Amino acid sequence: MTSPRVTPARLCAITAIIALALYATAMSGHVPLAKLPQALWNPDPGSFGEIYLRFSLLPRLLVAILAGAALAFAGTIFQQILKNPLAEPSTLGIMSGAQLAITLLSLSAVGLSSFEREMAGLAGGLAAVFIVTALATRAGFAPMTLLLCGMVISFSAGSASVILALFHHEYLRSVFIWGSGSLIQNDFSNVTALAVRMIVLMPLLLLFIRPLAISGLNDSSARSLGLSPNGLRLAVLFIATVLSAVVVSRVGVIAFVGLAASNVARLAGARTFRLRLLWASLFGATLLLLADGLVLVSTPFMGEVPTGTVTAITGAILMLVFLKAAPPSPTQEAPASRPRSQVAASTRLLLTASVVAACAVAVFSLTDRLFIREIDMADLFAGRWPRVLTSASAGIMLALAGSVTQAVTRNPMASPEGLGVSGGAGLGIIAAFFLGGMASPLTPLIGGIMGAAVSFGIIVVVARRRNYAPAPVLLSGIAIGTLATAVISLIVASGDPRASYILAWTMGPTFRASGIVAIIASAITFLALAISPLFRRWLEVVPLGDGTAKSLGIRPDRARAILLLFAATLTGTATMIVGPLSFVGLMAPHIAREIGMRGHMRTLLTSAAIGAGLMISADWLGRIVDFPYEIPAGVIAAFIGGPYFLWAICSQNKPARR
Amino acid sequence: MPDLNAEISKHHLTRRQFAAALAAFVLPTPLLAATEIPKIAVLDWGWAESLLALELAPMAVAEAPLYGNRVVVPALPGDTIDLGLRSWPNMELLRQLKPDLILSQAGYGVSATRLEEIAPTLALPLYGAERQPLQAAEKAMRMIATRIGRETTAQDYLQRSYDRLDALRQQMKAYDGRPLLIIKFADDRVIDIYGAGGLFDDILKRIGITNAWDGPTNNWGFATAGLEAVARYPDAHVVIIEPAPPGTLLESALWKALPPIRAGRVTMIPPTWVFGAFPSAMRFAEVLKSGLDLA
C-alpha cells in the first residue's frame, strides 16, 4: 500500500520545507525577507522586529523542533513497548497527570517558576504512569488494558482539573494557557532546558534499543533470551515518561504528535524499530513545526490559537482515519458473547429491589435538610424536585444508552462516555451556546443530540470495517474525547468570563435544572422506557453477529443504525444534564450484570433503576460536600465511575488471559 | 381547564406588574420601607461594591471570601453570608435567606426569571451591547438606590465621583499626553490589553487620556496577545496592572527591546477589579493618577 516514491526522508523534507516557508512568511511580517539572516544571527538592538525574530520566533522554532522530536521519540518507544500503535504520552495519561499536578501546585503557590512547574509535571506524569502500570500489571501488562487505564486516568485527571478551574478559573488562567500548548517564547530558556534534558535522556533510552526490538516480538521470545519483560518495560516506561513529562511541563499539552509521527513513519516504510525511532523523531519535529507555522501565519487573521489545540484537533482526526484504514488484526477480535444462563427466578426480586432502592434514594434526597435547616418544606420541595427528577432521568437515559451501546458494539466495556459520544454531545452543547446563546433550554439540548449523533456516526463508520472490535471503538472515543478537552481548554485560556459558565455546562450541573428541563428530560426518559421493549429482539440478535441476524430475518445494518440513534438521543439529552464524564452509562449495566441479572429486558430495566439511583446520589453528594458551593453531579459520578471503570477492566481482563 | 388557568394567571401577573410600574412612576416612594434595613442578596461583585458605596451592607454575596482578594475595597463586613459561585449561587440557601431583593448582572449566571421565583430581582446590565460599562454602572447604581430608597446617597456619591474625575482631568494636563497601553500579564508570555468596551477605557475618556489600543476587544473590553502587540505602539506609555511579570522576563532582551520599555515609559499600578462597577472604576482612576505621578 506504500508507493515506492514515498520514503520517510522525502516526507520529512517536504514537511520541513512547507513548515519553514510558513515560518519565513510569518517572519517577513516583522523584518524584510532580505534582512532575515542578519536579524537571526546579529539583530540590530534598535529594531524591535529584529530582536523579536531573534529572541521570540527563533526560540519558538527551536522549541517546536525539540518538543516534536522528543514527543515522537517517546511515543515510538511507548508504541514498541506496549505493542500498540496508538500509545503515546497523551493516551497513557501522562499529559493529564502532569496538568493536574501543575494545576494543584499553582493553587498553593503564586507565580510558579518553570523549575517548580517541571517538578510538579514530572510528579504528576509519573504518578499517572505508575497507576496505569500498577493496574495493568494485574492484567499481565496486556497492551489494551494499559491503554484503557491510561484513557480513564486521563479523563479523571482532566475532570479534576476542570473542577479546579470551575472554582478558580481566574487564578488558573496561566495554567490553562500553558495547558493549551502555546509555543510562544520570550527567550532561549526553554530551548536550553529541553536540549539538555534530551541529550541526557534520549541516549539512555537508546541503550534499550536491542532488548526493545526483541521484546516487541513477544513476551516468550524475550524471556527465552533471558530478559525480564516486565522489568524491562518498567525501566523504559520510566525514562520515556520522564522525557515526555519534561516536554509537557516546559511547553504544555501537545497531544498526538508522538502518535502521528511514528505511525506516518511506519506507513512511509520505516519497517524496523530503529528506523522508526529515527524517522519518527525527525518527522515529529517537522510536524510540530508545520502546525506551529500554520498557527503563526493565521495569527493576524484569527488571533493566536495555541499550537497544542491545533495538534489535538488534527491528531484526533488523523487517529480516526488510521483506525478506519488499518487492517484488522487477530488480537482485536470481538470477544465471544457469554453463554446466557437460564433466567433465574430471583431476577424479578433483584429488579424490584433496585427500583425500591432508587426510590428510597430519591425520597431521601428530596427531604434532606442537612445544611438548609430553616426552610419551609414547600419552599425546599419547589427548588428540589426538578434536580432530583432530572438526575434520575439522566441516570436512566445513560443506563439505557449504555446497555444498547454494549449490545451493539458487542463490548461489555463500551459506554457512551468511553466512546466519546458524551464528548461529542459536550462539543455540540458548546457550539449551541456560542451560536444560539442560552435563549431557550432547547438550544443546548438540540446541540447536544446533534453532537452525540455525529460522534456516534463517526464511531460506526470507523468501527464497522473492524467488525466492532472493542479496541478501535474505544480508541475512537479517546480521539473524540481529546477533541472536546482541547476545545474546552481553548475557551478557558481565552480569559472569557463566560468560561466558567461553559465549564459548568459541560460538567453537567443538575442544580441548574429548572422545572421545564426536568419535565422535558423525564418525558424523553418515559418515552425511551416505553419504546425500549420494541428493541428487545434486536438487542438479543445483533450481538450474535451479522450472519445469525440475517438468518433470523433482521437487517443488521438497519437495526444497528436505529439502536445507535436511540442511544445517541439519550446520550445527548443526558450529557446536557450531567456532563460528558459521568461513567454511569458504563457502571449501571455493568453493576446490573454483576449482581446477577440475566435476560435483556430485565437487565435493561434494572440498570435503568441503578443508573437513576447513582445519579440521584451523585447530585446529593455534590450538594453537600462543599456547601454552599455546588459540585456538578456529573463530576461526582465521574470520580466514582473512573475507579469503577478501572476495576472493571482489570477484573474483566484477568480471566480473559490465555 | 389548564388553559383558562394559565390565562388568568397571565392577566394577574400583568396587572401586578402594571400596578408596580404605576407605583414606581406616580409615587416616588421606595418599594421597601426605609426604616428597616433591607436584606439584599448580591450575585455580582460590581453591585456589591455599588451597594457598599450607597452605605448599605449586603446580607449575602456570592463568593464573598474571594471578593476580599479581588475587589479589596470597599470591604465587605466579615459576617456577609457566602452564596456560592457567582455564575451559579446556591439556590436553596437563597430560598432560605428570603432576601427582600436580589441583585444580579443581566446576561450572566442565573436568569432573572428563576431568581424572581425566590425574591424580587434587579438584573442590571453592565457589559451589554452599548459597550459603555461606566455609564451602565452609573445607571445601575441609581436603579439600586431607587429600589432601596437611597437616591440622595447615590446622587451625593456620583456627584462626588464626577467632581473628583473632573479634578483628575485637570491634574492629568500635567501628563505628557502620550496614549496609554494598559496591560496585565495573564502568564509570563501572554498579556491582556484593555481597550474599547471596558471600564478602564471609559475612565481614560473621562479624564482625557487616549487609550493606545485600537485593536478589537472582546465583550468585556480586553484583547489577549503576545508581547509583540506592545511593539505595535512604539509611542505609547505602558501601564502594567500588578502582579509584576517575572524577573526573568524583565531581564530578557525581548522585553528591553520593546520601544516604550526602552524609552523607560512604563508604570506599574496596583490591581483593581477589572469587571467591576463605579467604585472599581474610581479606584482605577486614583491608582492610575498616583502611578503616573511617580513615573
Image (cartoon, coloured by chain):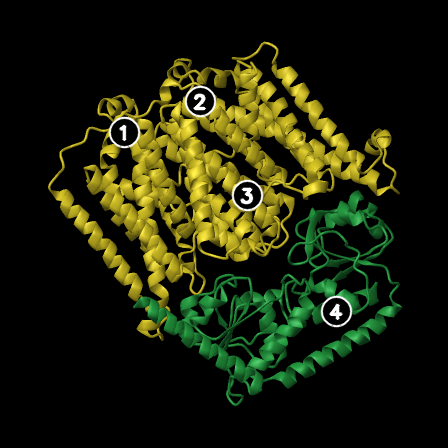
Visual hue assigned to chain A? yellow
Number of numbered labels in the structure image: 4
Callout 2 and callout 3 share a chain: yes
User: Quadrant location of the C terminus of chain A?
Assistant: top left
**What residue did someone put label 4 on?**
B285
**What residue did someone put label 2 on?**
A83
Residue A108: percent from the left, percent from the top? 55, 55
Image position of A253 with respect to A446: above or below: above
Kind of residue sitting beneath label 2: Lys
Distance Cα–Cα, label 1 vs label 2: 28 Å
Callout 4 and callout 3 share a chain: no
Give the image quarter of residue A156.
top left
Mark 3: secondary structure: helix
Mark 2 belongs to chain: A
Q: Which mark is residue A543?
A: 1
Q: Residues within 10 Å of mark 2 (few under 14, many from 20)?
A: some
Q: Residues within 10 Å of mark 4 (few under 14, many from 20)?
A: many
Distance Cα–Cα, label 2 vs label 3: 30 Å
Callout 4 and callout 1 share a chain: no
Name the residue at 88% across, 38% down.
A44
Distance Cα–Cα, label 2 vs label 4: 63 Å
Ranked by sequence position, the earlier of labels 1 and 2 is 2
Kind of residue sitting beneath label 1: Pro
Q: In this rendering, does residue B74 appear at all?
A: no
**What residue did someone put label 3 on?**
A487
Callout 1 and callout 2 share a chain: yes
Chain given the colour green = B
Ranked by sequence position, the earlier of labels 3 and 1 is 3
